Amino acid sequence: MDDAKLISRILARDEHALHEFYITYAPKLRRFIQTKIQNPNDGEDILQDTLYAFLDAIRDFQGNCQMNTFLQSICNHKIIDYYRKKKIRNVVFSQLPEVEGLVSPLLNPEEALDEVVLREELHKTLNKLLPQYKHVLYSRYILNMPVADIAKKLAVTLKSAESMLFRAKKAFVKTHEHI
């Protein structure tokens, strides 16, 4: 069956067409994802995200390319998003002295992370945090302050500052996942 007919049937809410679509394209996408993502669970999440995104974008598909090409394009964007979030999560939980490591090229050898977009996402995420979390993260990772100095500045114990930094990092990751 050609792509146009399959899409028409999917848009008409034909469950058999949706099943046929899944049987035809999911294995191809899964193999493609496995070449880019090591963790099978993350790969499966990306596959599901790709399929849902395709269903959201199906009305925009005009047949200018093969459906497989369209799907792989969506999948590539999902993989880039995955690595972007992973990179930010790794940096926040690491002991890197500066945020500059965040704007380095993406780990994926085929794609480079756009520095402007990443900086915007970083600032957007920081601005959604509680002011005390934003302050602690800024002090630790941008100003490179030792936790002991942050504790003195906030007039709290070292243990309290460490706990606040831990909660701030956790909130950063959780907030960034929703952006």
Image (spheres, rainbow, N blue to C red):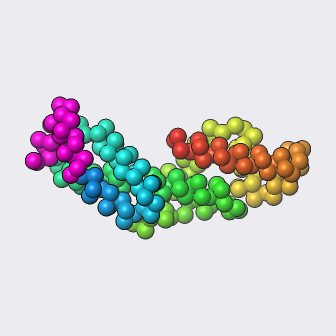
Is 113 situated left or right of 157 in this image?
left
53 relative position to 19: left or right: right
Q: Is residue 60 magenta?
A: no
The span picked out in magenta is 1-24
- By secondary structure, the bulk of the magenta-drawn segment is best described as helix
Write the residue at 75% across / 54% down: 140
- Residue 72's x, y, as percent? 29, 55
Residue 7: % across, % down: 17, 40
Q: From the top left corner, tell me how far across and down residue 90 is, in percent.
A: 60, 58
Q: Is residue 173 visible?
A: yes
- Compare residues 90 and 34 and report the one nearer the observer: 34
Compared across the picture, whether 88 is left or right of 36 comes to right
The answer to whether 59 is drawn above or below residue 90 in the figure is above
Q: Give residue 19's quadrant in the image.
A: top left
Residue ID at (79%, 51%): 162
Q: Is residue 130 left or right of residue 66?
A: right
Please tell me which residue is depicted at 67% across the width and 49% down the height of the picture: 169
Q: Is residue 18 magenta?
A: yes
Residue 123 visible in this rendered orientation of the protein: no
Q: Residue at x 15, y 42 (%)?
A: 6
